[in-house]
Amino acid sequence: MTTQKMLSVLRKGIEKYKLIRDGDKIAVGVSGGKDSVTLLKLLAEYRRFSPERFQIIAITVDLNFADAPTDYTPIKNLCNELNVEYFIEKTDIGKIVFDIRAESNPCALCSKMRKGALNNLAKEKGCNKVALGHHADDLVDTMMLSLLYEGRLSTFAPKSYLDKIDLTLIRPMIMVKELDVIGYSKDLPVVKSCCPANKQTKREYVKNLISSVGEQVPNVRDMMFTALIHPERYNLFDKFESQAETIK
């Protein structure tokens, strides 16, 4: 997919959920993976013609895996090309999660610590918003994770306010499909993940589960995404309870 087409879908999500406003300074969380690098590229391009005037910076939280250090030079070079200020936050999260704590479910603690480091540096750099590279498929996967492992019907929001640190979290690629991200990112400097748990997580299991359903129901992801974002397709028991007294 071309940059123009990707920007068209990106803009739909930004406008629908009012994710960007005049004067925003946005920290883009860049892990180096395809999603975050795509988001960085698209936001850098979008600011050129956006009706809202905004700034962006890029932040990478280095988890510091001792046995497999990550070289972020390709991301630094991309930021230079895009005229985006780039910061790397060095941490010991990898050591804490895998060595000191030896977590059986490392993703939850790692995610919490990584977001904390990202948000703190974003605040320090004067940002009022943080942008993450979650896309439409992530929205569906998160709902399935919550349903299967927590017994909840829940997923993330396109925009949420973090009152403890006074930052707004936005997900500008909320309407972009992962297949389009995969195709688009082939021309971008994606940095391979060095995480020991990569491709062995519950999220990966859920992705594969939905893909297997897709072999029989080819549009399953589109159907699930539509069900999540359109209120008129929602019909669960809280609605029944609110209407129960009016039903004879």
Image: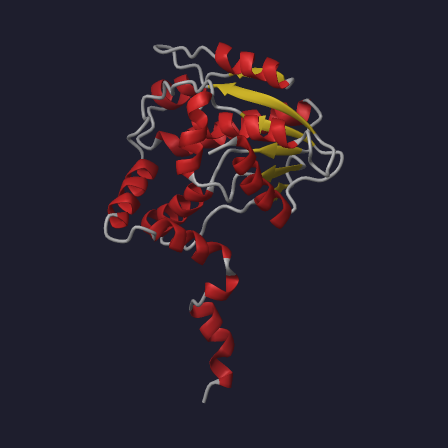
Residue 93 x/y as whole percent: 45, 20
Residue 52 x/y as whole percent: 73, 37
Colour setup of the view: secondary structure
Task: Report whether residue 100 is seen.
Answer: yes
Image-quadrant location for residue 100: top left
- Which residue is nearer to you in this view: 78 or 91? 78
Image-quadrant location for residue 28: top right
- In this rendering, the answer to whether 143 lies above or below 125 is below
Residue 15 x/y as whole percent: 64, 46
Image point 31% across, 42% down: which residue? Answer: 206
Image point 44% across, 14% down: which residue? Answer: 64
- In this rendering, the answer to whether 218 lies above or below 132 is below
- In this rendering, the answer to whether 179 lies above or below 78 is below
Question: Is 220 positioned to the left or the right of 33 in the image?
Answer: left
Task: Report whether residue 159 is seen.
Answer: no
- Which residue is nearer to you in this view: 65 or 49? 49
Image point 47% across, 85% down: which residue? Answer: 247
- Which residue is nearer to you in this view: 188 or 159? 188
Residue 43 x/y as whole percent: 60, 30
Q: Residue furthest bottom?
A: 248
- In this rendering, the answer to whether 219 lies above or below 74 is below
Question: Is 93 positioned to the left or the right of 202 in the image?
Answer: right
Q: Quadrant of the C terminus?
A: bottom left
- Which residue is nearer to you in this view: 59 or 222? 222
Image point 26% across, 50% down: which residue? Answer: 213
Image-quadrant location for residue 180: top left
How many numbered marks have been drawn onto this rendered protein structure? Answer: 0
